[in-house]
Image (tube, grey):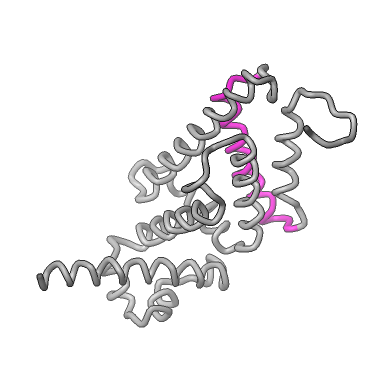
Amino acid sequence: MARRGSYAKGVAKREEILERALEVIAREGYRGASVKELADAVGLSQAGLLHYFDSKEELFTEILRKRDELDSRQFGGETQAVTPEGLREGFIGIIRHNAEVPGLVQLFSRMAVDAADPEHPAHKYFLERGGSLRTTFVEVLRTQQADGELTDRIDPEALARVFQAVADGLQLQWMQDPSIDMAATVSALFDALDPRPTTTGERP
């Protein structure tokens, strides 16, 4: 019983670390989020903090996983059926939210580059995350093409990668020029791919 209780406390502490780390990085930025600062935020030494993770890189990877989990809850990914409207609103909602947490965008972008190395702790995370995102997009895009709501000139698999590439690429541009409206740009892409004519300037 004591061992089970100790395990539960460890899981709870790990969750606390990840949630507080998200707050620190969102507030201080990626550069300001040293292991020491993250440890101070949860009342641990640096060694104590890393006791819950194999390395600093694994810590940052799990921070990104926690961010995805919270974003999914906030923007309906866990509870609402994937519909064209739900996909668009949720995807753009997350992108709009990202503009409010630049530190997390910096962390994601830097980790994405480092994770190109198959040995990096975040390599599997980025592969799985991208695959899951594209699978969701492909299902909806294929349905929209069948219903005439989306151009069929581009294969759904390729189009899903285009959306992923646009979102990730916009984050890099936005970090250099914060005046860029990432959400509006992605929304314009959705509109551009809709072949249905409009008479009022708005989609049906």
Question: Looking at the rendering, which quadrant does residue 57 occupy?
Answer: bottom left
Question: With respect to residue 129, does 33 lie above or below?
Answer: below
Looking at the rendering, the stretch of residues picked out in magenta corresponds to 154-178
Q: Is residue 172 magenta?
A: yes
Q: Quadrant of the N terminus?
A: bottom left
Q: Quadrant of the C terminus?
A: top right
As drawn, is 140 to the left or to the right of 4?
A: right
Residue 58 percent coordinates (x, y):
35, 57
Query: Which of 131/197 is in front?
Result: 197
Residue 147 percent coordinates (x, y):
65, 20
Residue drawn at 76 percent across, 39 percent down:
188
Residue drawn at 40 percent across, 77 percent down:
36
Magenta stretch, main secondary structure class: helix
Residue drawn at 60 percent across, 46 percent down:
90
Residue 110 percent coordinates (x, y):
52, 54
As drawn, is 182 to the left or to the right of 146?
A: right
Residue 172 percent coordinates (x, y):
64, 50
